[in-house]
Image (cartoon, rainbow, N blue to C red):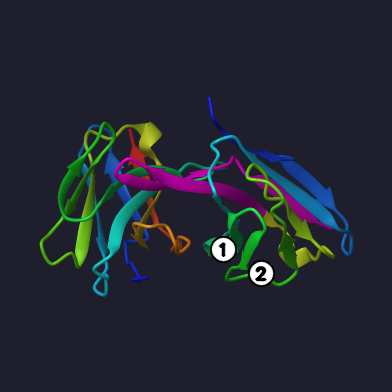
Amino acid sequence: LAKTTQPISMDSYEGQEVNITCSHNNIATNDYITWYQQFPSQGPRFIIQGYKTKVTNEVASLFIPADRKSSTLSLPRVSLSDTAVYYCLASLDSGNTPLVFGKGTRLSVIA
Amino acid sequence: DAEITQSPRHKITETGRQVTLACHQTWNHNNMFWYRQDLGHGLRLIHYSYGVQDTNKGEVSDGYSVSRSNTEDLPLTLESAASSQTSVYFCASSARQGDIYGYTFGSGTRLTVV
């Protein structure tokens, strides 16, 4: 599985759009990009998954350029409740290999 | 609603004791996983199972064992608890839902070995 690199931490004010970029230079053809969110004292929660171009759901958008060597998670108009750790993972769509989590990006939203 | 539950939520045990952490899911998922999370290490994979009677070792499996006798349960056993196993333990299950393949995690068990 491709190793992913993302910033250790980010700060943002409430109401701003937050973009968290993840680098995955060695991503394989069969890998998908998946983002998870983890609040303190809780297990990670699936946010969004994509293969290329743009994916949007009710929580976030995921942008993946044509070369797929990076991706960007976009959180529109963050609130204090979006303070969490965000994990970027490259994984096989088939699920035949367990997810390997890095240390994630700690997002702090400030009032 | 389907769910994944872990028990107990908190446990304190003594060094050398055998401890079993329970994980039960009603999603009917074949794939189940155990992770531990420590400050500075993120989540690390302990054991996983792709179905009944199937178990596999993860990155940090030493001192842990699992068994899978049915689809719903994957108990994690610490054979002889050590202080280094003080951690928060998360169980997860996974399956494909439409175009998405994702994990659903339990709320975790905080284990303290004294």
Q: Is residue A21 above or below residue B10?
A: below
Amino acid under disc 2: Ser
Residue drawn at point x = 23 percent, y = 32 percent: A15
Q: Is residue B69 left or right of residue A43?
A: right
Residue drawn at point x = 29 percent, y = 57 percent: A33
Labels 2 and 1 touching (C-beta < 8 A): no
Of pointers 2 and 1, the one earlier in the residue sequence: 1
Q: Is residue A111 above or below residue A22?
A: above
Helix, strand or loop for disc 1: strand
Q: Residues within 10 Å of mark 1 (few under 14, many from 20)?
A: many
Tell me the quarter of the picture where residue B85 sits.
bottom right
Image quarter where the C terminus of chain B lies is bottom right
Amino acid under disc 1: Leu
Disc 2 with disc 1 on a shared chain: yes
Query: x%, y% of residue A21?
Result: 24, 57
Residue B113: in magenta span: yes
Q: Is residue B87 left or right of residue B100?
A: right
Q: Is residue A72 left or right of residue B5?
A: left
Residue extent of the magenta highlight? B88-114
Q: Which residue is mark 2?
A: B61
